[in-house]
Amino acid sequence: MLKSTLEAFSDTNGQARLNAIIGTVELSNLIPPTVSYESRGDLLIIGAQDSITTLANQFSALHSVTLLATEKTAIDETSKSTKTEKCANLYFSKKVAIKGYLGAFEVTCRVDGTITETKANFAKVAIGRDCFDLVLDMTEEGIIATEIPAPGYYPVGAGKAKLADVIEELPAMLGTFDKPKYFRLDPDLCAHSSRGVNGCNRCVDACPAGALSSLGHAIEINPYLCQGVGTCATACPTEAITYALPDPEKTQNFVHRLLTRYQEEGGEKPTILFYGNRDEETITQTLTTLPSNVIPIALEELATVGVDTWFGALVYGAHQVLLATNTAYIPATIDRVLADELSIANNFLTELGYEENRITLFDLATADSFTVFDNPLVALTHSQTFAEQLSGTKREKLFAALERLYANSPEQPEYSAVPDNAPYGSVECKSDDCTLCMSCVAVCPTRAFHAVGGRPGLQLIEEDCIQCGLCEKACPEKVLTLKPGFNWNAETRKAAVVVHEEEAACCTSCGKAFAPASMVKMLTEKLQSHSQFKGDAIRRLAMCEDCRVRDIFSNMEDDPESQLRV
């Protein structure tokens, strides 16, 4: 359907667009890893008694139907009878907890009429199993409070599913179902926690499906709850989480090849239109009213790409990047993540003197009034036929794209403020109070902070700082303060700048430099009255670790009890 719409445009741009889309290798991955769900068809319907008893007969094709009423039907005072007929397998409980996914819903509650006062596994009580396979939730607020429901959970009462669709769909929810594992996780790159210190929570805050949680020392992702919206990967500043359907590099390479082919075919003023697969029908209809230089690119979900991909498109020759969306069904969390990324993008553009709507959300209803930008942001040199492809991590690609934009920009600021929570900036240090304990180096996930090497000193590479706050929290002297912002001077931004350094203390035995002189002085002053450092023992604080051990054992033969005074 989309292809036939594109074929209807016979002008130069329209033909260039068609040839570019047909001639560019499809944006896809090999089949990714999957997770499997097993459903026997045991359904739980929960809600007010009068709303659930009328539904039981609609699902007779399933293995079992259990009703759990959170509100009893009112009694008709004239007839002293209930307004609904008695229903088999009907239970009552006011407080219910549900967690899980298709084939594995754990329901705990205290069933009215039972002897025990404690909450029990309701599936064991009702059907003799550990869990239910499916849940139809008719309560107004919904028992599971996630913006995107888990597979097999249908919050009709909360308005997140339509009853007519559920009645049609549920009878088919029997058997084994496979779903892609949408993400890849590299714990070594994660800035969430280190050595008992908590830092970045961007991915947890960005998940609308409740699939991400903090274990304190690490992030955990439940692949059965993950719905593949991609906001976690977009929000992650270190690529600890990456999207896998397809991965970001394939997306960015595809954009480069597509724009290059479009321009090779004689197309002009290209505008990229990113959209989620679910919107293809709407996009197809909208393209009939948009200019023929608007090039659609389908994504698994709109939020799977972020600011690095958008700026990549601009430096590859796109005059504008449109993010097509239907706000009617976008959960608040996805909307917020996109808004945060757009805020960062627009801040960069306006700081450089460009129009902020070069990257913008695009309301499909406004297609009739859409106009293109006549000029690109990056002008090619005489030696360039097409823009060179960016390489590296997503952060490296973003910085490289910004450097190209900066070289052509109307405004060339030295330093810019950034929106709240943007992962760019530096760290200030009150060097007079810094002891060079290197706690900040130990917890830094990107090695933005690292030792000078060869002498007591601390260095920072501003470009690598993601403002996670681990260093600030780990510092025992509380001398570090995050400084959000963006340094446009690429040379100084990439340089390892000495934050603090000191004279080295040299071992009094072998002469080797082994610690900051101030630290040795501080320890000597604090420990000189300690019982373990009385007499000659205090001099060991001025020795390196090797000489200290040799000194401890040097007189042990003559005085064995000396080891107790170490």
Image (spheres, rainbow, N blue to C red):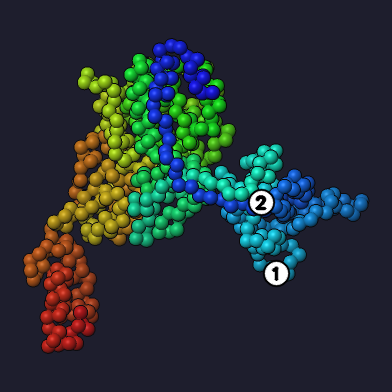
Above or below residue 366? Residue 492 is below
Identity of the residue drawn at 24% across and 48% down: 460
Crowd band around label 1 with a 10 angstrom C-alpha radius: few (<14), some (14–19), many (20+) = few
Query: In this rendering, does residue 557 appear at all?
Result: yes
Q: Residue furthest right?
A: 78
Looking at the rendered image, the quarter that the N terminus falls into is top right
Q: Amino acid type of disc 1?
A: Thr
Badge 2 is on which residue? 41
Above or below residue 245? Residue 351 is above
What is the C-alpha distance between the residues marked 2 and 1? 29 Å
Q: Amino acid type of disc 2?
A: Gly
Tell me where residue 514 sits by quadrant: bottom left
Badge 1 is on which residue? 116
Residue 117, image x, y percentages: 69, 68
Looking at the rendered image, the quarter that the C terminus falls into is bottom left
Residue 158, image x, y percentages: 65, 44
Q: Camera-side residue: 19 or 446? A: 19
Whether residue 473 sits left or right of residue 325 in the image: it is left
Whether residue 560 sits left or right of residue 45 in the image: it is left
Q: Camera-side residue: 82 or 242? A: 242
Identity of the residue drawn at 37% across and 50% down: 186
Whether residue 528 sits left or right of residue 254 in the image: it is left
Tell me where residue 396 sits by quadrant: top left
Query: In this rendering, does residue 145 appear at all?
Result: no
Identity of the residue drawn at 46% across and 33% down: 299
Q: Which type of secondary structure does the marked residue at label 2 adopt?
A: loop
Q: Which type of secondary structure does the marked residue at label 1 adopt?
A: loop
Q: Are marks 2 and 1 in contact (CB under 8 Å)?
A: no
Q: How many marks?
A: 2
